[in-house]
Structures are given as structure tokens and as C-alpha cells.
Image: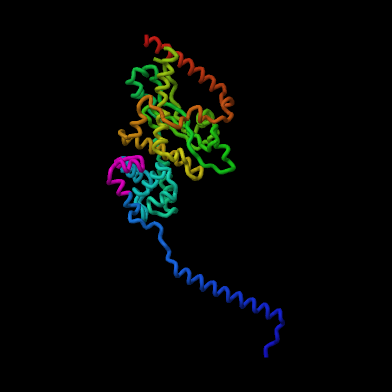
Amino acid sequence: MCASRTPAEWDETFELFVDMTLGYIALNMGQRYLNRIERLPMHTSIRTGHQYMLELLNQHPDRMFNKIRMYRPCFEMLIQVLRQQTTLQNSRYLTLEEQVMIFVYVISQKATNRMAMEDWQHSGSTISVVFTRICKAIASLSQTFIKPPNFDAIPDEIRWNPKYYPYFQNCIGAIDGTHIAAHAPTDVANNFRGRKSTVTSNMLAICSFDMLFTYVVTGWEGAVHDSRVLTTQLEDPTSGFPHPPPAGGINGSTELFNYRHASLRNCIERCFGVLKARFPILRYMTNFSLIRQREIAMCCCVLHNFIRLHNRGDPLFDRYGIDGVMPHSDSDSDDDAPSSSGTARDQDANSRNDNNFANDMRDRIMFEMYLNSN
């Protein structure tokens, strides 16, 4: 005979039985429910990403330009350079051409991951991996395509223009800063807010008069003034700043000088205009890490130079390349200048001496212009 149980033991046994029964019923119903549901694949478009790439490559050239801001010959040269100078190759499921086109599409259309998934019929993780891989590879080419000019040669844009030669024969380029859109973590977001209270990062750039970037620094907080960025780069021996040799002898009126100087200098504004018109992601940055945002800005500058070197008939360069044509929006002059402190502190004795030297040079050029104009 079984030993008699107390009421408490019978209650515990009954509760255990009920729990096991309910669990079995729930498991059985769940299994039946899952068996009835068919998993629906998401990316089932008849046109695959590879087919979309072939469409853009082989149909009307303006379709490709409108989508990735470059034409087929330039794109094919870019693929050739990436194969030769980086470790990029075809992956298991994507050709290198499709990977590069996805990356350029994202930065040219300020496309989100979801938009790229739909257009290229790949998963979000695939789009993310491809974007990161191509971004790092193109950024690694910065020293190849962003190089200092030849300090010994007078730029053709000055030599053959009587407005500038011989007054500006020692000029090698124009320098300025611009603000690009950024995403920053909440704890450091205030460091990236400028006068307009928008989150931006500061990019310092030097360009030649042929609208090629010759030096680029990205990633500075938007609240940092241009003068501080410049001073830091000048004082850092490892920055790679292209220090020109001391200028030789200088071989008007204030209005004449200001007009010609501004006309020559606006090449940097036109460079920024082409850069942001071609790559709208610089105006509407999506939520990447700060490191990735710096790499994206550098990639845009590398591609800017690459297109300038390999496609002289590029529509955007034709549009902004005319002397005197300024960007129609997004001026990066005084309105975008941050109101942070530091400009006065950055002006040490060496800076004042440089300013005096520049003022003397300006006065001599103005006087010679005035004599030659009469």
C-alpha cells in the first residue's frame, strides 16, 4: 500500500500536473500555428541588385549619373583602381562593381539602409557590411588622390590670366573650412553645435585653382572655429599640412584688389559647392559612428578628385567651374562660422607677424595693380 499523503502534498502534485498539461497544450498549439504560417521572403523583386546595376551601366548614361553622380567610363576606371590599389574583390554573392555602386548610391542619394535594401534587393546587414568595406577602401586612397601641388610651378589659371598674373604668381591654392551635417552622441552633441544650433562637423580643405583638393582634414567638432583647426594643423608636425616655401618678390586700388582676390579665392567655395551637390549625404548625414562619418567625408573628397581627373566634362564641374559662379545655397562663410571662443587666444605673436606680412604683401600688390590699370 502507498503511504497516505497529506492534503498539502496532494495540492502540490495537482498544481504540477496542471502546469505540465497547460505547457503541453501551449507547445502543441504553437507548433500547429507555426506549421500553418509560411515564411515570406522579403527581397523577391524580379529585378535583382545585379540586374539593376547592369541596367544603369547599359542604358541611358544620364540614368547612371542621376543615380550615382558619375558616368560609366569614370566608374569603370574607379573599379580598376580599387582592384589594383586595394584588397577589394568580388564577394561570394556580389561583384565588386555592385558593391561600389551601392556605396556611391548611398552617399549620392543620402539613402538610408532601408532604401538601399529595397533598391538593391539585399538584406540590411549585407548593405551595412558592403558600405563599411567600400568606405574604408576608398578612404585609404586619400594620400594617392589628395596631394599637395607643385610649389615650383605657377598654376595655369594664374599664368595665362592677366587679371591674376603676375600679381598672384606665388599663390598655390585657396583654403577655407566648411560645415557638414553630423550625428553625435548626446553627451558630446553640444560640442558639435555651431551658431545655427545644428549638429555639424568642421572640415578644413585646401584646393588648387583647378578645383582639386590638395589637403583635407575632417572630423572636427562643429563648435570649433576655423582658425583653431588651422592653427592646430600648422603646429602639428605630423599633420601633413603642405607648407609652401617662402614667397619671393611680388612682381591699385583697394576695390580692384578685393575684386580680383575674391574672384581667385572663390575656387574653394566652388569646390565645396560641387562636393555637396554631388554627395548630399554631407548635408543630411545618417546615423553613423563619428569615425565612419569622418571616413565618409574623406571618401567624398577622394571621389571628387577622382572624377575631376578622369572626367573633365562632368556636368557639376562645368556648372560650378565658371569663375564667379558661387553655390546657390549653403554658404559656409560668416553665417556658418561658430561662435565659440578661441579666436583671440589663437592669435599669438607668430600669427600677428604673419598678418603683418600678409598686409604688406597686399598693399604692394594693390599699388602695382593701380599703376598697371592707369
Task: Report which quarter residue 17 is drawn in.
Answer: bottom right
- Magenta stretch prevailing secondary structure: helix
Q: How many marks?
A: 0
Residue at screen point 58% across, 25% down: 344
Looking at the image, is 357 positioned above or below residue 37?
Answer: above
Residue at screen point 36% across, 22% down: 158
Q: Nearer the viewer, residue 163 or 338?
A: 338
Looking at the image, is 366 positioned above or below residue 136?
Answer: above
Looking at the image, is 71 positioned above or below residue 232?
Answer: below
Q: Is residue 59 magenta?
A: yes
Residue 210's spot in the image, x, y percent? 36, 28
Q: Nearer the viewer, residue 324 or 300?
A: 324
Q: How is the image coloured?
A: rainbow
Residue 75's spot in the image, x, y percent? 32, 42
Looking at the image, is 360 positioned above or below residue 31?
Answer: above
Q: Nearer the viewer, residue 133 or 341?
A: 341
Residue at screen point 43% across, 15% down: 255
Q: Which corner quadrant holds the C terminus?
A: top left
Residue 162's spot in the image, x, y percent? 34, 17
Q: Is residue 350 magenta?
A: no
Residue 113's spot in the image, x, y percent? 44, 49
Which segment did they paint magenta?
Answer: 53-73
Answer with left or right where residue 78 lies relative to residue 242.
left
